Amino acid sequence: MSALARFVVDRRWWVVAAWCVLALVGGFAAPKATAALTYDFSLPGQAGYETNEEISRLFGNGGDLSPVLLSVKDPNRDPSRAGQFRFAVQGALPGARVSTYAEQPELIRGDIGVVVVYPPPVPGGDPYAAALPVLQQVAAAQGATVTGKDALASETGSGGGASVLAETIFGGVGALIVLLLVFGSVLALMPLLIAAASILTTFLIVWGLTGITDISFIVQFLLALIGLGVAIDYALLIVTRWREERGHGRDNDDAVRAALVTAGRSVLFSGVTVAVSLAALIALPVPFLRSVGFTGLLIPVVSVLASLTLLPALLSLCGPRLDWPHRRSAEPDSKLWRRIGTVVVRHRWLSAIAASVVLLVLAAPLLGLRLGQPTNASLASTGSSAGAAITAVDSAGIGSGITTPIEILTNDPAGVRDKVAAVPGTAAAITPIGWTVGDHSIVLAWTSADTSTSEGADVAARIRAVAQKAGAKVGGTPAQDADFVEATYGNAGWVVLIIVVVTFLLLARALRSVVLPLKALLLNVLSLAAAYGITVWIWQDGHGTELLFDQTASGAITIWVPIAVFAFLFGLSMDYEVFLLARIGEEHDNGHSTDEATVHGVARTGRLVTSAALILFLAFISLAQVPTTEVKILATALALGIIIDATIVRGVLAPALVAALGEANWWRPGRLRRSRDT
């Protein structure tokens, strides 16, 4: 690190010029990279996915796409309307599959009738972008209402919302306010400059990668908003240490070098830890998550590079001039956090037990975790016409699973239909007219309960088992969702093992201890469990979703969210552990006892970590403005995880355990044992 510091300071202008070029080209590349992202959720080799691909190939629609529903009031008043629906839909959307309530009595209950439509999709994130406006016109002409999963998503804004740029600006403004409070000078702009250069450079790399492989559209939000928070966090740590060294009398360039040797080392190990946790997603047999993994790891890598090169070059060039009007002391010691650290160390066992109990209580709802898509009730809660229509369909008793029916591909439709219809919990199984190509026919079945509930999912699984036993192939969104869970979480043990082992080795090297990495890993598990638990409590169980997000509970946590949260949050929360433990270790090396070093470490990192956590929290709040429910759930878990880790874990539990373990913290086998002379 000393050699890097000398290199950057000696060639400061060249370093700044290189990053300026990268940022300018990145600004040109960012919109092109965003336009090249894909909406592919394929699961090669999984039975449900392969069946859906076959259905889509044979019929030109359906498969992993849910149908659009036309809800008709008083269908018996004019029976001829059903035929008019078929004629109008197929005339407006050639190639669409249609089944009406007149042909299938199961699609009518009381005063509500349903027309099921599988329109031909278009490429992109909204497969029914062309079909929904056409169906809206048809429905309006026939006195019906368009509903279904895609119609609900469209009316609740899942296809719109603020742009990535707008959300990044929102997060950046929040970060600037925090930085102004931290530095009290123009120096607050420095971390934002590092974040801007990091984000634009990362988009440049992603643009190049899109020419090689498919990259998920979700990456754009992660790169912009998580990149904003991570880059600012790393820059904040180094700038704070630079100011501290300047306050101790060092000249500017010496302060830059000292900041890189100390804080820069922590940034390097923190960034590598985050990158490793994200890289582990590549081990999963899910292309979508793989793309999130290998592009997500670019966030910490580029942020670290910018923080260790561009930032010291800028500090060397103009740091003292930007540290104006210097309203805050350069000394990082916080009186508040010193008092907290003193109380925690004095009452270490009580603090450790109390913090652990709080985390376990927060984690308790995790025991009821249910993976799936948002329920009909959640999507309908915004009060749209599609929401009112699906609520009426559910209430009529047609079956909540009609929004995500099971498509069964078979050459014995009558036999399979009868067997499936006999499965308890099945609302209906029908053989729609004209849904045959060659000797392949579709049996459409749906559950009484929403398939996003545990009851509905269990029934869908039983239907699948019965149909497969009868020699049929089973597709539809419930089958592919079940396969997604198996593909993702059936291999999750390997992902967790890879992350834990590599992280332990990195931390053992960084902290020069065996005990501290073990403790950090244990606390990370508790922190993650608490974040998961409160996310389940809010989104799945519905405590506060209407107040916070103006919609009802999702009824389930989106399938891919927990593994993505683990990959991101494991590394991000470990940052604060590294910042705190590294400073405690430094104070211990300077001759303080473990208790004294712990109090000094908490006091000197408290304000820094709190500010860094607040910046990341604001970035995740920005991410929650994305109107897609699953992204809101992801943002909620990340925001809660960061806050929990920066307060309960880093502020209380971690220092309490360090104080409780005493000199055992620094034990390491053999000659590599940490000593004060290291």
Image (cartoon, rainbow, N blue to C red):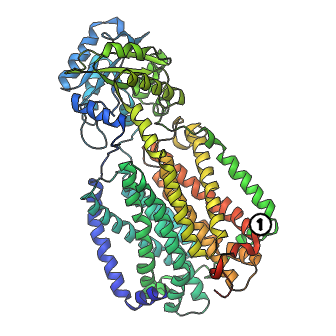
Position in image of residue 44 (x %, y %): 33, 43
Relative height, residue 653 to residue 187 (above, below): above
Position in image of residue 112 (x %, y %): 41, 14
Left or right: 657, with 99 as reference point:
right
Identify the residue at horizontal 54%, vertical 36% (top origin): 553
Q: Is residue 232 visible?
A: no
Residue beneath disc 1:
344
Q: Amino acid at mark 1?
A: Val
Which of the 4 image quadrants contains residue 50? top left
Relative height, residue 152 to residue 466 (above, below): below
Which of the 4 image quadrants contains residue 518? bottom right
Q: Secondary structure at mark 1?
A: helix
Q: Pick the residue in front: 234 or 165.
A: 234
Left or right: 162, with 79 as reference point:
right
Tell how many labels.
Answer: 1
Position in image of residue 173 (x %, y %): 47, 63
Q: Pick the residue in front: 257 or 478.
A: 478
